[in-house]
Image (cartoon, helix red, strand yellow):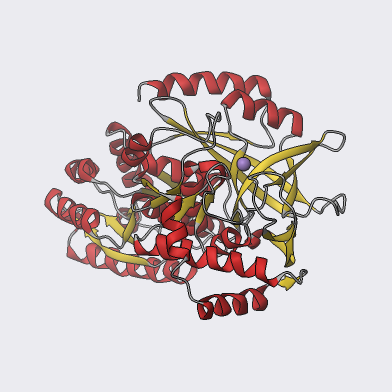
Amino acid sequence: MNFWFIVGSQLMYGKETIDRVNENALVIAKELGSRLPFPFVYKGTVLSNEGAVSLIKEANYDAECAGIVTFCHTFSPSKMWINALGLLQKPWCHLHTQFNREIPDGIDMDYMNLHQSAHGDREHGYIGTRLRKGRKVIAGHWMEDSVVGRLGKWQRACVGAAVSRGLKVVRFGDNMREVAVTDGDKVGAQFKFGWQVNTTPVGDLVEAMGKVSGADIDGKMDEYRSKYDFKTDDLETVRYQALEEIAIQRILDADGARAFSNTFQDLHGLRQLPGLATQNLMSKGYGYGGEGDWKTAALTAIVKAMAPGATFMEDYTYDLKNGISLGAHMLEVCPTVAEGKPRIEVHHLGIGNREPPARLVFEGKAGPALALTLIDLGGRFRLITQDVLCVPPTQTMPSLPVARVMWKPLPSLEVGAECWILAGGAHHTVLSYGIDSEVARDWARAMDVEILHIGAGTTTADFERDERISDLVWRNA
Ligand code: MN
């Protein structure tokens, strides 16, 4: 994936000025390219309607182009961009910067005409708003860490958008019975997000497991030994997870799928609910959703593509005295959020009516994170995000042998939960240590989907009003 840097100018100032614009643009692109998480390529300066149209068409059809960044170095009458921006299908960031940070003592009219983004970028902004084009606007000098940092976040969101457009999700079995929030409109999701969500019978998985050799399982066991501590002697049970993992991955890879769901209510022919198998797959970037939750499976894969350190998660139980939520799942929490080396353990699972499964047990890392949930409101989707602070475990919980994370929702457990529930947020989330709400907002803009955010400054009263307004805006969008 790469990003195109396109500069705006015009021929009115003569060739010498355009040469300077080109030189400066190359300097900016080189510097940003060395500091951003993804390549940043200068693609030229637009000087006409035809030039803009041709470049934007090229960006649309280049599969490697994840987004365009524009900057009007001189006064660039952006009327010449109208046809091009009307065609634009890639995420757009308007970088409102200026080549020189300060005004030189000897400033003259030539200098001012060359360094005129304060003027040209305003025209550019007017055209963007007039066309109602969603775009990110970042203002500040291009060398500033804050500018580079925010541009990098936007790049991550764009990569997430590109991954989303081509994502395939395999559903092993249907959704858990009698649960609404994990279901939704799969056709609508393909139209909005690009996801191809299709079913694969659990019987096909069982059949694929029959084709896995002992040597394949030996290799997977070596991988487990290199990554995890074995806290069990029951190697046969661990080998069964290895067998499941290999077969699941073969089915996913055969179709180019990067996410999957399953449900404990449809395990026909399986001796264990996949636990370690799912966890190890998630650590490799595959998305997962429990109980048939294909939306969270897809979102997990997308968030993982944006930044490492993310997992399928579930709000499980509260410490109301200390304002802490205990997040876990029956088994399937990704070890990329683990503090220390995860342990492989085998324990009885009181759900699913199968043999005790092997699973990874660990505590989550401390630090700021973002919880994301995607719900289907009937006719549209809504993304809800919340800032959380993951905390070191406050108890050892020896009788709860699952991977778990404890966090303080912001601004508090009570206000956070009130807003989350008012917004209709699910119990399933993606928990990410690698992205923040700005990245989520950039991704939502790129996908043209509603987003609500709960953070340190949120109050229930403001949130309730904002949710009603947002509902009004997006209901018929
Ligand atoms: Mn669940």
The quadrant in which residue 27 appears is bottom left
The residue drawn where x is 41% and y is 56% is 204
Q: Is residue 102 visible?
A: no
Image height of 206 relative to 451, above or below: below
Image height of 39 relative to 464, above or below: below
Q: Nearer the viewer, residue 70 or 183?
A: 183
Image height of 31 relative to 54, above or below: below
Where is residue 246 drawn, in percent x and y?
50, 68
Quarter of the rendering occupied by the C terminus: top left
The number of numbered discs placed on residues in the rendered structure image is 0
The quadrant in which residue 208 appears is bottom left
Does residue 93 appear to the left or right of 453 in the view shown?
Answer: left
Where is residue 12 drawn, in percent x and y?
17, 53
Q: Nearer the viewer, residue 116 or 85?
A: 85
The residue drawn where x is 63% and y is 62% is 276
Where is residue 94 drawn, in percent x and y?
37, 48
Quarter of the rendering occupied by the N terminus: bottom left
Does residue 416 appear to the left or right of 194 in the view shown?
Answer: right
The residue drawn where x is 20% and y is 53% is 10
Q: Nearer the viewer, residue 275 or 339?
A: 275
Q: Is residue 27 visible?
A: yes
Q: Where in the image, quadrant-wise, is ligand 1 located? A: top right
Where is residue 214 drawn, in percent x and y?
53, 78
The residue drawn where x is 75% and y is 34% is 413
